[in-house]
Amino acid sequence: MVGIVASWRCKCGIRVKVVAEVDPSQPPARQVAACPNCGESRNVQADKIISVTEDISEASPAFDSKHDSESNVSRCNEKERLLAARNKAFEIYKRLSTELAEAAGRIAHAEFEFVANRARNAREAFLDTAEQFNEHTAKHGC
Ligand SMILES: [Zn+2]
Ligand SMILES: [Zn+2]
């Protein structure tokens, strides 16, 4: 399982933050997350929802900008880089999985194999980046 965070601005005005888990060996599933404030639900691509909370980091813009510049100092660049790489690899994998599902039975076998290969490679790349990220945070404690 790989942890993901999704967030959006709810129509009631708060920012909803969802922490969820995705099983990279399975095609993306859909879960419903409800706003803790008004109960408005949203679909999230995940296998398991861990928590749904109000994201208060944006609540006060004045406090927020100060808080941000402070946390930037202690933020680990390597962690950020690995996280960005992992998220990007996951996006590619997700896109190719969708492409593959849509292509099934619709295109020639050879072409399907080509898409299937790319999806497999994208999955490998995603698992690699996820592992690098987990290893780094475990070792570095960041
Ligand atoms: Zn709401
Ligand atoms: Zn680190």
Image (spheres, grey):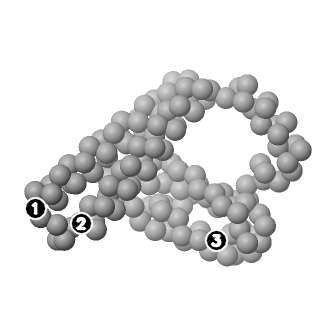
Point out the tag, 2 or 3, that comes first from the N-terminus: 3
> Relative to 71, is 19 above or below?
below
Does the numbered disc 3 mark a residue whose Cβ is under 8 Å from ligand 1?
Answer: no
User: Disc 3 on helix, strand or loop?
Assistant: strand
**Residue placed at 52% from the left, 38% from the top?**
84
The answer to whether residue 137 is visible is no
Residue at label 2?
103
Q: Amino acid at mark 3?
A: Ala
The residue under label 2 is which amino acid type?
Ala
Secondary structure beneath dot 2 equals helix
**Pointer 1 residue:** 109
Q: Quadrant of the C terminus?
A: top right
Q: Quadrant of residue 103?
A: bottom left
**Quadrant of res 35:** bottom right
Q: Position of residue 141 (x, y in %)?
A: 59, 27
Rendered location of residue 15, percent (x, y): 73, 60
